[in-house]
Image (tube, rainbow, N blue to C red):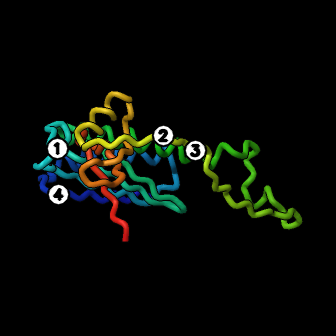
Amino acid sequence: MALQINVFSKDLKLTDRINDYVMKKVSKLEKFLSEIEECRVDLAHVKSARNANDRHVAQLTIRGKGLILRSEERADNIFAAIDESIDKMIRQIERFKGKHYRNRGDGVSAGEAFSEETEIEEMEPELRIARRKSFPLIPMDEMEALEQMQLLGHENFFVFYNANTSKINVLYLRRDGSYGLIDPIID
């Protein structure tokens, strides 16, 4: 079965050079995973990106029997974004193959491995809290919380008691490098 490749662009002129480049690169994904039936490639130029190195976006979505994988990368030019997105997709395919193919080394399909006589127990994943942590909340404003977050080396989030609003807030690092603040409202 031939791989069907659909290329779409937004705020970017899809030239023959870009289209040929995408077709050449994406068609190589088939050698990594033969079950791929369709690949959607979305290319975009984001004028409002804060960083000039993040203006070109390449997003790949591959579909096949029992799989959907997606990768998105940003770069300063469209060709670099395509290359990085392809590399990321290859890593995802390898991870997917590892989860589905390496578990049974004898080459026997799952249906053959478990005969009808074998009783299969359905195991529910165990949901549990692995760790509890308690710490004192010192009232502080948002800027103090940002300084504390950086001083403590908390990279993703910081929980604090906001002295201005008398509420517990969460300060978090956004993808673009800026910070966000979660200010909960109790109904």
- Whether tag 1 and tag 2 are in contact, CB under 8 A, the answer is no
Q: Nearer the viewer, mark 1 or mark 3?
A: 3
- Residue density around tag 2, few if under 14, some if 14–19, many if 20 or more, within 10 Å: few
Q: Give me the residue at 49% from left, 45% from top.
A: 93
- Taking the view exactly as shown, the residue that stands out farthest to the bottom is 187
Q: Amino acid at mark 1?
A: Arg
Q: Could you give the CA–CA distance between mark 1 and mark 2, rounded to whole angstroms?
A: 41 Å
Q: Position of residue 22 (x, y in %)?
A: 28, 47
Between label 3 and label 2, give the one nearer the viewer.
2
Question: Which residue is the site of mark 3?
Answer: 132
Mark 4 Cα-neighbour bin, 10 Å: few <14, some 14–19, many ≥20: few
CB atoms at circles 4 and 1 under 8 Å apart? no
Question: Disc 4 versus disc 2: distance between alpha carbons?
Answer: 48 Å
User: Which labelled disc corresponds to residue 10?
Assistant: 4
Count of labels shown? 4
Which circle marks residue 135 in the picture? 2
Amino acid of disc 3: Arg
Sooner in the amino-acid sequence: mark 1 or mark 2: 1
Instruction: State the residue lying farthest toward the right.
Output: 117
The residue sitting at 22% across, 50% down in the picture is 19
